[in-house]
Amino acid sequence: MTPLYDSSAQRPGALPPPGCPAHEGAGAEPLHAPEFGRDPFAVYRRLRETHGQLAPVELDRGVPAMLCLGYDTALEIMRRPETFSKDPRHWRARNEGVLSGTSYAPQVIRPRPQVDFVDGEEHRRLRGAIEDCTGRIDSGALRNYVERIADSLIDQFCEAGETELIGTYCALVPVLVTSQLFGFPQQAMDPLLRGVVAFIDGSDPAGGDRAAAAALRELIDLKRRDPGADITSWLIAHPARLTDEELVEQLLLLIGMVTGLVPGLIGNSLRVLLTDERFSGELMGGSMLVEDALDEVLWTDPPLANMGLYFPVHDTNLAGKRLRAGDAVMISFAATNRDALLRSPHKQGNRAHLAFGAGPHACPGRSSARLIASVALEKLLDRIPDLALAGDVEELKWLSGVFVRGVVSLPVRFAPVARPGAGALARPPPARASGIRRASGTRRRKGRCRGCRRACHRRCRRGRPRRRPSRRSRCRSPPRGRRCPEVSPWRGRTWRSRGRTGRNSRSCWAS
């Protein structure tokens, strides 16, 4: 993969003039330097010791910014939209023309009708449309589809005994899910993905942006003629009446998050599993849920390490430093999650991390992203529980750049596993050797409610088959997602369904 930044390139006219914040803050740390790519957390520690919670940095040559390293300070920025704007039109360095035209950040972070770069009423209109459409995704159907994709990909390498997981699994699962979620024809995915990859990894951000936008316009035209049950069709038909340019921008953001960051979340989780004995022991031993494992990785090594450029709309004080209107402030999710001032060091089950942002601009697709990543991990570890790193940890190569954090490749070895029979998907065995625990709410058993005859999905906490309802119990056919008023004949048992827990009760979910 092409490095995000070329630190050795000399760009004419890239040095900021006198009066620029890069000169005002002496000793700005160059995040485009090779040292940052080798060990960013050492750089974060040194910056925190030297400057506190706000440190002057260079995102690229001639692109000055203040890097937020403190958890509380980051929350203050993200939760004060009246003071800190996401609109790049406030960026003073851009308005004064001191930014290098070849730098990655100015090409990506520019005025555009995208929900992440607007504020106020326009932001609420675009975000409302996105949340309405992503909220229509059926989590059960999405889980089943991810499981089928994961099985088909694992079948391709399970008998070999070795593979490279990033290219053969971690990156492909979100790509194939994207095709289904957004209604992309398979033949149209290649140009879109090439554009998105060039846009994210920085090899050609302007060209990648144009290529992805052209592919999305073709998709929008297709869905106007032949709408379907997908996010693209729902956005087109939404009452917010998004223009074609707004549709392209929102789709580019959502697809970029799924295909660009979910692979990093899956890959980082597997890397920690293969290199951390404590983590792998708890996860494979059954004392840690897969969902909790993801949260721990999001705390310690989020795939989106630095992003969230904010701009003060007026001069203000923050963390003991004076910020001028229009100064760029970038939040380091990787650094703020490791803030030593956080009260509790326990990350398992704690979702207060900032990996998905916070405030009005928090990631709108975080629930789907977590579901895709958790199912991909569950399926892989169920099918191949004895994964081991093929080589030394020091040999792993990391993606270079400021914004993303992940390994380029993840070679593994394992005992070969036979593929399932033709037409039969691999199913987790009754007693799994890995001992992996799934989060409550995983659909396990499908039957029929005796009263309404609708499909019911029930899962016992202890994983045992459930008895059929008694003749006296009747379901009043509740709407989908409501609790069924039946009384369980299993007295004293605790049942869980989609996070709800109650004694002597069960839930009915009409399909």
Image (tube, helix red, strand yellow):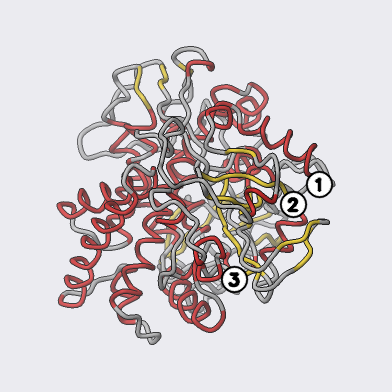
**Residue 37: % across, % down:** 53, 31
Looking at this view, is 267 or 3 the one in front?
3
Q: Which mark is residue 342?
A: 1
Q: Report crowding for label 1: few under 14, some 14 to 19, many 20 or more residues within 10 A (C-alpha).
A: few
Query: Relative to 349, is 167 above or below?
Result: above
Determine if residue 431 is in view: yes
First-in-chain label (1 vs 3): 1
**The N terminus - image quarter:** top left
Of badges 2 and 1, the one in the foreground is: 2
* In the image, farthest residue toward the top: 391
What type is the residue that disc 3 sits on? Answer: Glu
Q: Of tags 1 and 3, which is closer to the observer? A: 1
Q: Earlier in the sequence, mark 2 or mark 3?
A: 2
Which of label 2 and label 3 is nearer to you? 2
Q: Which mark is residue 486?
A: 3
Q: Earlier in the sequence, mark 2 or mark 1?
A: 2
Q: Name the residue located 47 percent from the left edge and 45 percent from the top edge.
A: 373
The residue at the point 69 percent across, 68 percent down is 79
Secondary structure beneath disc 3? loop
Relative to 154, residue 238 above or below = below
Q: Answer yes or no: do the residues labelled 2 and 1 have beta carbons within 8 Å?
A: yes
